Image: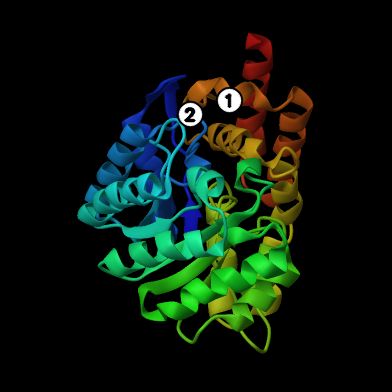
Amino acid sequence: MFAAAHVVAEDESTVDWDATLAFRHHLWSHGLGVAEAMDTAQRGMGLDWPTAAELIRRSAAEKAGRICAGVATDHLTGEATLDDVLNAYLEQLDVVQEAGAQPVLMCSRQLAAAARGPEDYEKVYGTLLDRVSEPVVLHWLGTAFDPKLEGYWGAADVPRATAHFLEIIRSRPDKVDGVKVSLLDAGHEIGLRRALPPGVRCYTGDDFHYPELIAGDSEGFSHALLGIFDPIAPVAARALAKLAEGDTEGFHRIMAPTVPLSRHLFSAPTYYYKTGVVFLAWLAGHQERFQLLGGLESARSVEHLAEAKRLAEIAGVVDPEFAERRWQQWLASR
């Protein structure tokens, strides 16, 4: 199980490295893996590739727990050809593999713009899979998280896109550890999970339906690579321990209060969920400033954050008295 971790900002353009790494140790201490330099870390929304590369190297060097890291093409500028996209992926893949992290092949805005059909996705991803030194995770990020990924895998129609996606996986199943699906559609994820080749995992990225997807059914279950695990790590760890003991009822009882919080944080526009994640990290005392790269702390309203605080208290994610003091300080400083 992985938590997609946020970065702690010192100011609008600078990462606080000590606090950022300390937060990763917090996640590892609860038995979670760290998914590094992913969407939660403001990838493409304040975190540029040079800083992401440094983040990956620093986190992997800690050697304190399981770590995977995002491989993308976000350092490309202007129009890009398929070869440009492939070379950009390969450049980032080298960094992740050299750091010792498991690669997560993230969706590429540049590939979505350059590709003319499923064969272009097969060309790029097939070449990447042939070049990896260990099985990777393929990431499918939906348009709720990034509207520029419309038509990914060569079709705007999700069933057709899924068929193309599965063809790529089935062509090289030994190179795919799993797939991370962030479409916020539990039914689709279950269908995809059942269609995967033996040995290929499904890592849920569904921040709306994660408890039932992780608990699974008689035909299987989803592992997790979730942004919501960042703020709810201690609660999620307790719930997962119950599940490991075979206490499914206990798992759901602990996890259930986190779902309204997650649905609120990931409400539209979903790509601003990072604001709420960092807000809760600050309310919980994991960092000294409520600050995001690029000034993204202003992306959500005071009303939205007030409701996030209320739901976090109900879910047991923050200490109510400590959170209230910080909340009042923040309101007074506005």
- Closest to the observer, 24 or 160: 160
Q: Are marks 1 and 2 in contact (CB under 8 Å)?
A: yes
Marker disc for residue 92: none
Image coordinates of residue 141 in percent, x first then y, are: 58, 53
Residue that mark 2 sits on: 46
Q: Residue at x 24, y 55 (%)?
A: 63
Element type at mark 2: loop
- Closest to the observer, 163 or 72: 163
Q: Residue at x 70, y 63 (%)?
A: 158
Element type at mark 1: helix
Q: Residues within 10 Å of mark 2 (few under 14, many from 20)?
A: some
| Relative to 263, residue 277 above or below | above
Image coordinates of residue 233 in percent, x first then y, are: 53, 53
For badge 1, the amino acid type reads: Leu
| Relative to 305, residue 172 above or below | below
| Relative to 240, residue 198 above or below | below
Residue that mark 1 sits on: 296
For badge 2, the amino acid type reads: Gly
Q: CA distance from mark 1 to mark 2?
A: 8 Å
Q: Is residue 169 visible?
A: yes
- Closest to the observer, 285 or 95: 95
Report whether 268 appears left or right of 153. Answer: right
Report whether 311 appears left or right of 204. Answer: right
